[in-house]
Image: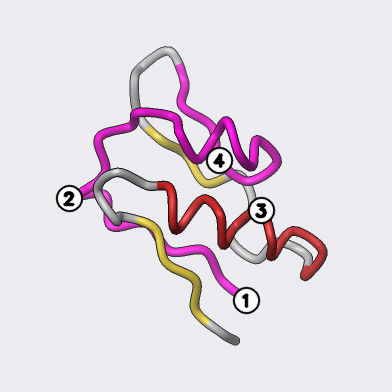
Amino acid sequence: MKVVVDFDLCESNAVCMGIAPEVFEVRDDDYLYILDESPPESLRPKLEEAVRSCPKAAISLQEN
């Protein structure tokens, strides 16, 4: 699976980072960074929660 963020929609509010800090990070510059674009399958439940919880619907998962 691949994590995709639409940075035009993203507000860097860090909801995703709170759910999956292994994959998402909002840094001091107030921008969201994807730490692992192809995370292990074991993180799928957290990533699906991050997708559902994103207030701007900026996160999606693509299957490889």
Give the label on residue 8, or none.
2
Q: How many marks?
A: 4
CA distance for labels 2 and 3: 23 Å
Give the label on residue 46, or none.
3
Between 49 and 29, the one lying in front of the other is 49
Q: Are marks 3 and 1 in contact (CB under 8 Å)?
A: no
From the viewer's perspective, tell me whether residue 27 is left or right of residue 63: left
Residue type, mark 3 in image: Lys
Residue name at image x 30 percent, y 55 percent = 58
Q: Earlier in the sequence, mark 1 or mark 4?
A: 1
Crowding at dot 3, Cα within 10 Å, few <14 / some 14-19 / many 20+, comes out as some
Q: Quadrant of the N terminus?
A: bottom right
Residue type, mark 1 in image: Met
Kindly give the residue lying farthest to the right in the view shown.
Answer: 42
Residue name at image x 74 percent, y 58 percent = 43
Q: Where is mark 1, residue-wise?
A: 1
Give the label on residue 24, or none.
4
Task: Using the image, determine if residue 8 lies above or below residue 26.
Answer: below
Residue type, mark 2 in image: Asp
Task: Using the image, determine if residue 51 lies above or below residue 23.
Answer: below
Q: Are marks 4 and 3 in contact (CB under 8 Å)?
A: no
**Residue 23 drawn in magenta:** yes
Kindly give the residue lying farthest to the left in the view shown.
Answer: 8
What stretch of residues is rendered in magenta? 1-27
Per the image, label 2 sits on a secondary structure element best described as loop
Residue name at image x 60 percent, y 86 percent = 64
